[in-house]
């Protein structure tokens, strides 16, 4: 009997996920422990391994499609085995659309009086997201008096004839998916829901430079090379224990203030930005903190972090100190309440 493959719940805050890549294709043989697909959570992309052996019979989720956790997204079983298409997601979608229709009956009646087109809220929303004209979709229907979600999905717009004069012939489109989409969504959420007040200050770093030179001179061959970011992270973690107003997270029930410092250090990747978290950073020596920061940064760039290493941050620092940037306005890493940006020394 075929075994269901579910969208896994990879963190306590994850309620939906999207497949960024099917590593195994339909018809491929899968061994226990082999990665089947990569899933994007609210924090990171993680490879999901098979827990049974067999043939990947059928996949039901497209790359980039978001589905709730525990949704059946594939089956593994014996080659040639027949499996039914799961109807759970379709039923939920239909119920949601019907509820939206009931709620919007009066609004639709008013729109018709104004000469507008009848359409369910779900259909209008998808049409907006796809950049489609709801009136054109309505006119393409052979029957019916209302545009439904399925009509928008099935609609194939007629491409207009465009003159080639002065049109750019080559372009590269970077799709909004995976880590890049997650970063974009998080940035938009932060800027649209959190008031940002930016304060800039210059400080004399002479003693910081002297301290780093002294530590480098005393370091052993196998020690992690200490950077200015490591030193700032170390002192920041110590100071935050006395300033829990900014060592905090803004959650639905209020602002949670902490004595323990879980320090996030923003790390730039080729396709986005993530924030690995050093837990209990205030308890670490400078060498231990430098080692953890370097290790997290390396594993972030090879997609080897686990979800726990990206969650629970209480404060974040982000540095452009190795560039020519003097100062900048970083975006708060919600639900944290503050962030420190570091420019050129």
Image (cartoon, helix red, strand yellow):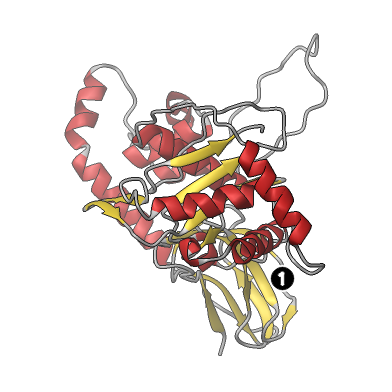
Q: Residues within 10 Å of mark 1 (few under 14, many from 20)?
A: some
Q: Nearer the viewer, residue 140 or 32?
A: 32
Counting the numbered discs, the total is 1
Above-or-below relation of 64 to 118: below
| Apparent side of residue 122 relative to residue 318 in the rendered image (left or right) | left
Q: Which residue bears the numbered disc 1?
A: 24
Above-or-below relation of 50 to 163: below
**What residue appears at the point 48 percent right and 26 percent down from the top-left corner?**
200
Q: Nearer the viewer, residue 2 or 173?
A: 173
**What residue appears at the point 26 percent right and 43 percent down from the top-left corner?**
101
- Tell me if I can see residue 265 in this picture: no
Q: Where in the figure is residue 137, as x and y percent of width and height?
A: 47, 30
Above-or-below relation of 148 to 67: above
Quadrant of res 297: bottom right
Quadrant of res 22: bottom right
Q: Nearer the viewer, residue 333 or 205?
A: 205
- Tell me if I can see residue 262 in this picture: yes
Q: Where in the figure is residue 86, as x and y percent of width and height?
A: 47, 70
Q: Where in the figure is residue 66, as x and y percent of width and height?
A: 49, 55
Image quadrant containing the N terminus: bottom right
The secondary structure type at the circle numbered 1 is loop
**What residue appears at the point 60 percent right and 85 percent down from the top-left corner?**
51
| Apparent side of residue 126 relative to residue 205 in the rendered image (left or right) | left
Furthest toward the left, the residue is 106
Furthest toward the bottom, the residue is 1
Q: Where in the figure is residue 278, as x and y percent of width and height?
A: 53, 61
Q: Nearer the viewer, residue 260 or 72?
A: 260
């Amino acid at each position: 009997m075929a075994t269901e493959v579910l969208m896994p719940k990879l963190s306590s805050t994850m309620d939906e996920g999207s497949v960024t890549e099917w590593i195994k294709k339909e018809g491929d043989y899968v061994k226990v422990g082999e990665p089947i697909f990569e899933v994007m959570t609210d924090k990171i992309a993680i490879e999901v391994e098979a827990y049974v052996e067999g043939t990947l019979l059928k996949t039901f989720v497209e790359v980039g499609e978001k589905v709730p956790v525990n949704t059946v997204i594939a089956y593994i079983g014996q080659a040639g085995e027949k499996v039914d298409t799961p109807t759970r997601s379709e039923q939920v979608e239909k119920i949601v659309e019907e509820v939206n229709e009931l709620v919007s009956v009066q609004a639709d009646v008013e729109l018709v009086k104004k000469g507008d087109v009848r359409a369910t809220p779900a259909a209008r929303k998808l049409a907006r997201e796809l950049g489609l004209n709801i009136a054109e979709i309505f006119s393409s229907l052979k029957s019916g008096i209302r545009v439904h979600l399925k009509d928008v999905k099935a609609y194939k717009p007629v491409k207009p004839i465009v003159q080639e004069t002065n049109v750019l012939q080559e372009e590269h489109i970077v799709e909004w998916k995976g880590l890049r989409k997650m970063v974009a969504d998080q940035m938009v959420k932060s800027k649209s829901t959190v008031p940002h007040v930016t304060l800039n200050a210059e400080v004399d770093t002479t003693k910081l430079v002297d301290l780093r030179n002294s530590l480098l001179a005393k370091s052993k061959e196998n020690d992690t090379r200490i950077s200015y970011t490591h030193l700032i992270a170390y002192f920041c973690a110590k100071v935050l224990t006395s300033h829990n107003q900014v060592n905090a997270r803004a959650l639905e029930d209020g602002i949670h203030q902490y004595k323990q410092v879980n320090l996030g250090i923003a790390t730039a990747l080729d396709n986005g930005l993530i924030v690995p978290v050093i837990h209990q950073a205030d308890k670490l020596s400078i060498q231990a903190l430098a080692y953890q920061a370097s290790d997290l940064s390396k594993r972030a760039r090879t997609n080897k972090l686990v979800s726990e290493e990206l969650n629970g941050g209480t404060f974040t620092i982000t540095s452009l100190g190795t560039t020519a940037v003097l100062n900048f306005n970083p975006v708060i890493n919600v639900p944290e309440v503050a962030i420190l940006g570091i420019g050129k020394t």
